[in-house]
Image (tube, rainbow, N blue to C red):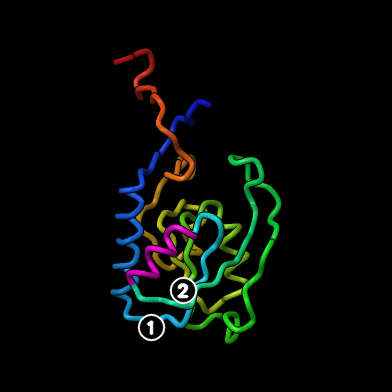
Amino acid sequence: MSLPEKAFPVSWDQFHRDARALAWRLADNGQEWRAMVCITRGGLVPAAIVSRELNIRMIETVCIASYHDYDTQGQMKVLKSISPEIAKSGGEGVLIVDDLTDTGKTAAEVRAMLPKAHFAAVYAKPKGRPLVDTFVTEVSQDTWIYFPWDLGFTYQEPIAKGTRG
């Protein structure tokens, strides 16, 4: 598998630092969160880090499948919705966490479920950025982020074509 021209590989260390930076930004907000909803699967890792840093104990998941063959976004499918207890009052006092908002389709789906919740993502792309309240790093729409849970150790081609070591 060749990497796209604009590949952004993220190591475990970098992701942990970025997720903690997200927690710092959220802590500066001063909000007391009654619950967290993480968007699976990508939101599970940042949710673990952010919930620890902000001492959020009530953690819920919403399961939405949109990438059915890893790199092509398809039809949205809600596999598991949010519990009525968390969804009450439109999600007021609820923190939504995801790894990335890309096209904004998943974010829009969850926003419709929890319109009063605060949406936070570690990374944001321009199309999804308007749906996110807090994020750490913005990357261009044509950049593909490789998360550490998707990577193994392999040789990386140099950016300049035709050069090796």
**Above or below 19: residue 157:** above
**Residue at the image point whose x is 38% and y is 83% from the top:** 32
Residue 57 place in picture, x, y as percent: 43, 77
How many tags in the picture?
Answer: 2
**Above or below 151: residue 47:** below
Pick whichever, 140 or 79, lies toward us: 79
Amino acid type shown at disc 2? Leu
- On residue 95, which mark appears? 2
Q: Secondary structure at mark 2?
A: strand
**Above or below 99: residue 86:** below
**Above or below 143: residue 80:** below
Quarter of the image for residue 120 reads bottom left
Does 149 sit left or right of 66 as displayed?
A: left
Does 145 sit left or right of 78 as displayed?
A: left
- Reading the image, the residue beneath label 1 is 32
Pick whichever, 106 or 61, lies toward us: 61
Label 1–label 2 contact, CB within 8 A: no
- Distance, label 1 to label 2, CA atoms, is 10 Å
Quarter of the image for residue 113 reads bottom right
**Residue at the image point whose x is 57% and y is 76% from the top:** 115
**Residue at the image point whose x is 49% and y is 41% from the top:** 150
Residue 49 place in picture, x, y as percent: 37, 63
Mark 1: few/some/many CA within 10 Å (<14, 14-19, 20+): some
Q: Secondary structure at mark 1?
A: loop
What residue range appears in magenta? Answer: 44-53
Mark 2: few/some/many CA within 10 Å (<14, 14-19, 20+): many
Q: Main secondary structure of the magenta part?
A: helix
Quarter of the image for residue 143 reads top left
Amino acid type shown at disc 1? Glu
User: Considering the image in quadrants, where does the C terminus appear?
Assistant: top left
